[in-house]
Each structure stands twice: as C-alpha cells, then as structure tokens.
Amino acid sequence: MAGALSEVLGEVLVTADGEEVAVSALAARGVSLVGLYFGCSLGGPCAQLGASLAAFYGRFRGEAAAAGGQRLEIVFVSAEQEQQQWQEAVRAMPWLALPFADKHRKTGAAEHPTCQPACASGRRRLVLCANRMLRHPKSNAQLAVGWMGNNKERRCQLKLWNKYRVSNVPSLIFIDATTGKVVCRNGLLVIRDDPEGLEFPWGPKPFSEVVAGPLLRNNGQTLDSSALEGSHVGVYFSAHWCPPCRSLTRVLVESYQKIKEAGQKFEILFVSADRSEDSFKQYFSEMPWVAVPYADEARRSRLNRLYGIQGIPTLIVLDPKGEVITRQGRVEVLNDVECREFPWHPKPVLELTDSNAVQLNEGPCLVLFVDSEDDGESEAAKQLIQPIAEKIIAKYKAKEEEAPLLFFVAGEDDMTDSLRDYTNLPEAAPLLTILDMSARAKYVMDVEEITPEIVEAFVSDFLADKLKPEPI
C-alpha cells in the first residue's frame, strides 16, 4: 500500500497540530480507503462540507476504536496560497493534510537546458521525418490553484489537482489505499446519500445496475431501463436553469435525430439537475429521449456519483456494454454536427477549437502551435505528435489511469490569438508548449526544428518533473 499511496501523496502527511505522519503508517492502521479533500478556508461551501465531513469521519473513527482498525482516512489538499490561510483551514480538521511549504521559498523559473531563444532568422521548421519538412515564417470559470513556482511540495500538491481533474472546491475523491486508483469521484454525494457509511467503500458499479428501474418519455409513457441494452447510450446531465445546457440541448436534439435516422442504435438518458419537478417537466418536454424520473433522486444521485459529475452540461457516451467511450460528448456533438464520427471514440490529438478549448482547464495540455495558412501544416503536426500521444495514452490506460496530458494542435484564429496573449507566448510557429492553466504555468520549447524526438524528449522531461515552469 505504501508505495502506491506515497506515489500519490508523498512520504509524509501532517496533523492539525503539525505532527508528521508517515504515509507508510496508514497501512498499520488498517486504512483501505483514502478520501482526498480538495478545499480552502474561504468559508461557504467548504465550511459546510467541513462540518458534515467531520461528523461523517467521526463515525468511522468511532467504528475504528471499537473494531481495532481504521478503514477510512481523509487527507486535505489545500487550494491556499499563503501558509497562514492553510493553518486556519487545517486547525479544526480531525484528519490529515498534505504539508504546506511556503511557495515563495524558491522563486524564478530557470530555463530548461534544452530550451532555446526564439529563432533569429524568422524561418522555422516542423520536421516529420528526414525526407519531409515544412517551412514557414515566423472560458467557464475554473478554480485556479495558483502559480506554484519551483517549490517541490506545492507542485506535488498541484499534480494531485491535475491527476484527478479537480476543477472546483470543495471536492472529495475516494481512492483505494492499496492501488491509489479512484474508487469514487464524487464523495460529496456519498456523504449526503450514505451518511452512515453503509455502502462503504462506494466502489463503481455497472451502469446497468445503477440505472436499473423505470424510465420516462415526455408523453408520460414508462419503459424499463433494460430497453437501453444493446444500444449506445448518452448519459446527459443537464438542467433548464443552465443557459449552456439549453444551448447544447437544441444541438443535441438534432444530433440524436440524425443518428437515429442513420439506423444507429442510440439512446439518450436525461439525468436532471433541475431545482423543481415543474422545471424538469418543462425542460424534458423539449427532449425526444428518455429520462430518470425526477422523483427518483437516489438514482439520479447514484448516476452522478458513478461518473463523478462536477459540472453541467455533461454528456457521457457509453458503448452497448455500458463502458465509457468518451466523457467529452458535449465537445464531440458541437464539433461534429453531422455526426459522421459517432460514437466519438477519443482522438489522441485534437485540433484546438472554440468548442473544445474548455478542455485546456482540465489539466496539463501539450499544444503545438502551427501556421495554419500553410497548406497541410495542421495535419502534418498531428502526424508528428500522434505516435507520442498514443504511446502515453496506452501506457496509462494499461494502468487504468487517465493520461496526464491532453494533446492539441493549434492553428491561427482569434481563439488561438487570445490563448497566446493570455499565456504570453511568442508569436513563433511552430511552437511547442505544455500549458497548465490550473497551475498558471507554461513550458515552452522554442527551437528552429521540431522533430518527433524533440517532442518525445519534451514530454518525457515534463512527466519526470525535469522541466522548469514559467508563470502564465
């Protein structure tokens, strides 16, 4: 257990009193599940969760004292930028926390040895292989944890935010203490739905089991969830009060009809986040698919827990066996209005667009900027980085983990210009970067030639923590 947890949490945790606790000691306590509590000291939702989580945690500690073992431990992962705020947040917590290290202790962002200044000649090239060369001239508000500088401990904390794709606080993610793998992404609903911990350890269940029960059509007709068997299913988390949801629904209705007319077996399941049954009925009246009954709050909550929903609209696309094809159904629907690529299996490399730019907020992203006015440049850039992206994705899929990087090619348009301005990147192209919006950090490889070997070394150094970040 210690090895997997140490890889996630480091070697040492601390108590509210500042006492150090070795991560390896958790095994001796009988801990089988660890809750990563991402939060802050700013009150509001974090304060409310803190109170309910303390009661929840206390019940497990009481059980542990009676049974001679402790099944659950909570670890606080702070969003605080100042040590005093961190101390205020931790002071009243009965659980453990990742240590805070003053982010100002080390300053500056020294350039990595392989990074070079911009090409003075004004002519740069993207090299696919020895015989092919291209020449050319030179959004939803997300939580930002903040510029971490070169402080190892603070960057270690940030890696947790990126690893688990945490975009808002408070968030509670349960991981297996033996393997370090995610058991449940939406622990907030666990505390609400199972305050006594009767369903411990809250592991994932098959979609068919979680969704089991009657479903509705907007004409009042009911059907059993078994009717979904053998079809691709889009699990649609949405609400009428949410303007982006209503906009997506209009597009999704057209996509649904096109897919059905093409003879594909496809159904959409609406899981409402509306605030009243009247709102649900009004919204559902616009939808030609099925829904979980609004009154069945427990089933709606279990589906939210199953897929770790942190925001709406979200469209999860499942294969006929109930396995996830993509969590980015929203992006796919907006990018593929003719539904030619349904059921939207993920691509290793994406072309950066207005509709998928929101993914830049989900974690570190490799972005290769190119001159899209040069015919074939974007496609050549995709070919250059795709084998590297595929290798990374396959490596982490084998470990049942999400890849630590998303891969994009960015051409020249208003959105890309805005991104360059926001991140203060040079105007050069091609330009190889890794952008970490949540850390407000960037890594830039500004060289005359970009080859597969350079990209692979750049990615490897990033994953090995050998690159020095610059602030965004």
Image (cartoon, rainbow, N blue to C red):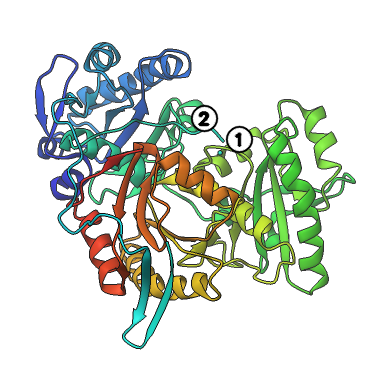
Image location of residue 342, percent across then percent down: 66, 68
Does residue 215 appear in this view? no
**Which labelled disc corresponds to residue 193?**
2
Image point (72%, 35%), residue name: 243
Q: CA distance from mark 1 to mark 2?
A: 8 Å
Q: Left or right? Give the position of 300 relative to 284.
A: left
Does residue 16 appear in this view? yes
Give, as a three-letter code, the residue at label 1. Ala
Give, as a three-letter code, the residue at label 2. Asp
Image point (20%, 44%), residue name: 5
**Which labelled disc corresponds to residue 298?**
1
Dot 1 or dot 2: first in sequence order is 2
Q: Left or right? Give the position of 101 relative to 127.
A: left
Q: How many marks?
A: 2
Furthest toward the front, the residue is 121
Image point (17%, 47%), residue name: 1
Furthest toward the bottom, the residue is 131
Residue 8 is drawn in which quadrant? top left
Mark 2 packing: few (<14 Cα in 10 Å), some, or many (20+)? some
Q: Does residue 57 sit above or below 161 in this rendering?
A: above
Image point (32%, 23%), residue name: 57
Q: Left or right? Give the position of 125 relative to 342.
A: left
Q: Marks 1 and 2: CB-CB under 8 Å?
A: yes
Mark 1 packing: few (<14 Cα in 10 Å), some, or many (20+)? few
**Which labelled disc corresponds to residue 70?**
none
